[in-house]
């Protein structure tokens, strides 16, 4: 890894932690902040994640564990609320480097894709429908809600990615570091108990 890639990763990590940007946009904005051409090779997400963890350890060690706990507890509430759709927590909240600026990302595995929307309507939840890249590179619907988090005393975005039930098996394949990219309610409960 060259020094330039590490500098890009460190700058991107600061943007992820301080502004809540996702890795992709943070890397591109880091290029602009560093005055580098847009075609400059970008560091991998694994390198950025390492820098994010280092940044948190250095600058947010006193607040981040409490914020992570609050987000995981909020995720548990939503997973219990939507248990019939086999929810799996992913992203920063699952991986353990989330701060108060991070959203909760849940994957729902449904027999009928519209059933999750119907469940939100029945729970009187306001939501927006968006489209995002899914597990296999295909576009999937994302139902986004704002949920008040008492522990943080603010609204947190909760994003529900809607998948077919058949996608569940491939959703648990380990990432490049051998970690599960997401976990079900029982796995989250183990994290909260630890």
Image: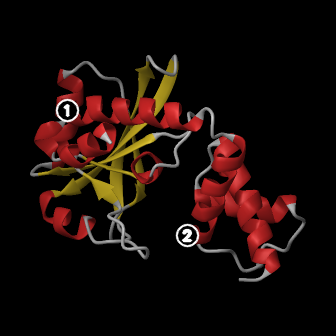
Quadrant holding the N terminus: bottom right
Q: Residue at x 84, y 74 (%)?
A: 37
Q: Nearer the viewer, residue 21 or 95?
A: 95
Quadrant holding the C terminus: top left
Q: Position of residue 33 (x, y in %)?
A: 85, 58
The secondary element bearing badge 2 is classed as helix
Q: Which residue is mark 2?
A: 46
Q: Earlier in the sequence, mark 2 or mark 1?
A: 2
Q: Position of residue 130 (x, y in %)?
A: 41, 45
Task: Residue 80: give its label.
Answer: 1
Q: Are marks 2 and 1 in contact (CB under 8 Å)?
A: no
Q: Is residue 174 above or below residue 97?
A: below
In the image, taking residue 113 as reference, residue 42 lies left or right, namely right
Q: Is residue 101 above or below residue 165?
A: above
Q: Nearer the viewer, residue 123 or 155?
A: 155
Q: Residue at x 25, y 44 (%)?
A: 190
In the rendered image, the residue lying farthest to the front is: 194
Q: Position of residue 32 (x, y in %)?
A: 83, 61
Count numbered badges in the picture.
2
Kindly report the distance in space between the C-alpha atoms of the residues bearing marks 2 and 1: 30 Å
Q: Nearer the viewer, residue 49 or 126?
A: 49
Q: Is residue 116 above or below residue 6?
A: above
Q: Residue at x 11, y 40 (%)?
A: 84
- The image quadrant that residue 172 belongs to is bottom left
* Mark 1 Cα-neighbour bin, 10 Å: few <14, some 14–19, many ≥20: some
In the image, taking residue 154 as reference, residue 54 lies left or right, namely right
Q: Residue at x 51, y 31 (%)?
A: 66
Q: Position of residue 46 (x, y in %)?
A: 55, 70
The secondary element bearing badge 1 is classed as helix
Task: Residue 18: give its label.
Answer: none
- The image quadrant that residue 120 belongs to is top left
In the rendered image, the residue lying farthest to the bottom is: 1
């Amino acid at each position: 890894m060259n020094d330039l890639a590490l500098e890009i990763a460190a700058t991107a990590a600061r943007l992820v932690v301080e502004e809540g940007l996702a890795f992709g946009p943070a890397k591109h904005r880091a290029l602009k902040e560093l005055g580098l051409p847009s075609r400059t090779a970008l560091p991998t997400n694994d390198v950025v994640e390492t820098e994010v963890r280092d940044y948190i350890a250095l600058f947010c060690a006193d607040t981040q564990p409490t914020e992570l706990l609050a987000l995981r507890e909020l995720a548990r509430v939503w997973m219990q609320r939507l248990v019939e759709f086999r929810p799996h927590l992913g992203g920063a909240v699952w991986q353990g480097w989330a701060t108060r600026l991070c959203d909760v990302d849940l994957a729902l595995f449904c027999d009928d894709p519209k059933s999750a929307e119907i469940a939100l309507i029945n729970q009187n939840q306001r939501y927006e429908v968006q489209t995002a890249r899914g597990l296999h590179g295909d576009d999937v619907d994302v139902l986004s809600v704002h949920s008040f988090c008492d522990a943080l005393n603010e609204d947190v975005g909760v994003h529900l990615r809607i998948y077919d039930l058949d996608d569940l098996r491939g959703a648990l394949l380990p990432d490049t570091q051998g970690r599960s990219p997401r976990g079900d309610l029982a796995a989250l409960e183990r994290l909260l108990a630890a």
